[in-house]
Amino acid sequence: MGCFAFLKAMMFVFNGIIFLAGIAILGVGIWVKVDSGSILSFLGKIENAPPQLSQLLNVGYLLIGIGAVLVIIGFLGCCGAIKESKCMLLLFFIIILLVFIAEVAGAVVILVFRPLANDLIAKLRTAAVQSIKKDYGKNDDLTGLWNTTMDTLKCCGFDNYTDFTDSPYHTENRSYPAQCCPDTTKLCNQTAAQNTPGCFIKIKRLVDDNTIVIVAVALGIAALEICAMTVSMTLYCRIKSTRA
């Protein structure tokens, strides 16, 4: 019973942390969506704040989704362990198992279709450049998305500044976006923008530089999921056997 009690305690503590984190994330997501007016008012008071900063409010939906999933998982794990509920423990096991299977399937798909990566990248490049040339400077959502991306990664366009040539923004202003010329406050022309790398290059470089970290995090998450499934199923079987 000592081992059984220890597993219950660890299950409760681990999932209690997940539950509290889920509530916090869910609360922030709901606040962002419900009180968006106050947030926009606050953002408007920030000196030199770009208007595209308001696009960050869309992250509220993602926070709500992640928070809800964490709350459900944490609740099932905590209550299942403390109340020794076989039903909750089984649901907890099934949810973690489905997440684990989805992650493994995603990894397999990436490995199997890796030879097609260049073709997919080419199609993505074509679609991205076409959208920039058609809507950048005219579509507020797309313009805000690209500006936020370029501000964050310190990049310009998908490949380089030429992606913006003949776009609505370039046609109207006869210049390139300010993000393409971070080292100058003057008009962003071809000469000033040519040294800023494209966003795809920056993302690829970021992934390449952090491959070991990404793999380590992925393996760590997988190990935690396997441990969670093992503990929950162990408790499930012990509860079944002790009550039989």
Image (cartoon, grey):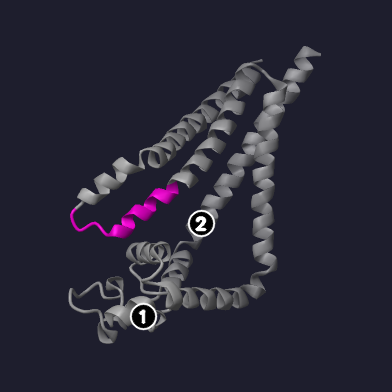
Magenta part, dominant SS: helix
Q: Residue at 77% across / 19% down in the picture?
A: 240
Q: Does residue 72 appear to the left or right of 90 in the view shown?
A: left
Q: Please give the label number shown on residue 134.
A: none
Q: Are marks 2 and 1 in contact (CB under 8 Å)?
A: no
Give the residue type at disc 1: Tyr
- Label 2: which residue? 214
In the rendered image, is residue 181 in sight? yes
Image coordinates of residue 63 in percent, x first then y, are: 47, 43
Residue sitting nearer the eye, 241 or 51? 51
Image coordinates of residue 91 in percent, x first then y, are: 69, 31
Whether the magenta-drawn stretch holds residue 58 is answered as yes
Q: Does residue 68 appear to the left or right of 236 in the view shown?
A: left
Q: In which quadrant is the N terminus drawn?
A: top right
**How crowded is the residue under tag 2: few (<14 C-alpha within 10 Å), some, or many (20+)?**
few
Whether the magenta-drawn stretch holds residue 135 is answered as no
